[in-house]
Image (cartoon, rainbow, N blue to C red):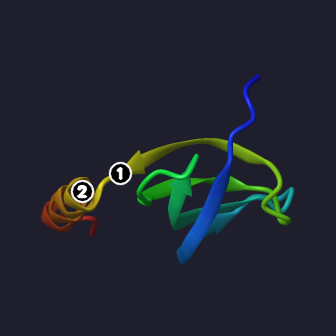
Amino acid sequence: MANIKYEIIEKVGEISESPKGWIKELNLISWNGRAPKYDLRDWAPDHEKMGKGITLSKEELKSLRDILNSIDLD
């Protein structure tokens, strides 16, 4: 497997924590030296291991926000 380099530019927030201590986080991350994108995934407590996730541009995150705001969760 290729070595993936990443830098967490900004920790935006924590969504949840699993019983094993992994935390689902929304972060702004630069992958392999590229422009940072918003990233949602599970992280081990030391941020050395990660689960599968999704990356979103600022525009995609705004679209997701609008969709979520339109949902009636009550």
Viewer-closest of 20 and 32: 32
- Position of 4 relative to 62 (above/below): above
- In the image: residue 57, left or right of residue 54: left
x, y percent for residue 35: 41, 57
Residue ID at (24%, 56%): 64
Q: Mark 1 belongs to which amino acid? A: Leu
Give the percent coordinates (x, y) of residue 53. 54, 43
Helix, strand or loop status at disc 2 = helix
Instruction: Give the Cα separation between the discs numbered 2 and 1.
Output: 9 Å
Q: Earlier in the sequence, mark 2 or mark 1?
A: 1
Residue type, label 2: Leu
What percent of the width, then of the height, locates residue 10? 53, 76
Quarter-of-image position of residue 68: bottom left
Query: Disc 1 marks which residue?
Result: 56
The residue under the point 86% across, 56% down is 20
**What residue do we see at 82% from left, 59% from top?**
19
What numbered label is drawn on residue 65? none
In this rendered view, identify the residue nearer to me: 64 or 55.
Answer: 55
Residue that appears at 78% across and 61% down: 47
